[in-house]
Image (spheres, rainbow, N blue to C red):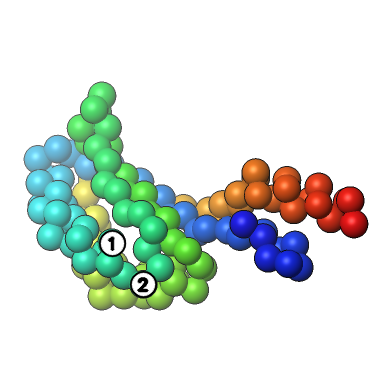
Amino acid sequence: MSDKTGVVDTNEDAFIAARGIASSCEGLLQTIASLIGSLRTEKGCLRCDFCQNIEDENELCIIEEWDTRENLNSHLKSERFKVLLGAMSLLQEPYELMVYTVLHPAEMLGSILSSERS
């Protein structure tokens, strides 16, 4: 959505990809299971999902969506996130953390079109 100034709303998405040996993932799975509920209740969390590739059980990812960059940054500094990263550090390969800013294109297009008519 956009406000009266034409500023378009965005969300911040964090994607954490990890790879490990399935047997070593068990501890990570238990850690995530114990954290996921509390992660979802953090201020600004819109989504927090844990996924395991059905074709390769060694591939794991966590997808998080946050309402603002400020709330995402607070989450990344939280004790819960530190516990999660500690568990992930035990895996076979280093994890990747990618952060994306997501624009809402339908709302953005409407904002652009309405400003052109003015």
Task: State which quadrant residue 59 falls in.
Answer: top left
Q: Which residue is mark 2?
A: 43
Residue 81 position, x and y percent, is: 29, 67
Q: Going by the image, does 91 lie left or right of 3?
A: left
The number of discs equals: 2
Mark 1: secondary structure: helix
Residue 104: x percent and y percent? 60, 49
What residue sits right under mark 1 in the picture? 40
Dot 2: element = loop
On residue 25, the disc is none
Q: Amino acid at mark 1?
A: Arg
The part of the image, by quadrant, that contains residue 79 is bottom left
> In this view of the protein, can residue 67 be seen by the observer?
yes
Is 65 displayed left or right of 81 in the figure?
A: right
Q: Dot 1, how many residues are within 10 Å of its Cα: few (below 14), some (14-19), or many (20+)?
A: some
Of residues 97 and 103, the one drawn nearer to the viewer in this rendering? 103
Specify the farthest residue to the top. 55
| Crowdedness near tag 2: few (<14), some (14–19) or many (≥20) residues, C-alpha within 10 Å | some
Distance of mark 1 from mark 2, alpha carbons? Answer: 8 Å
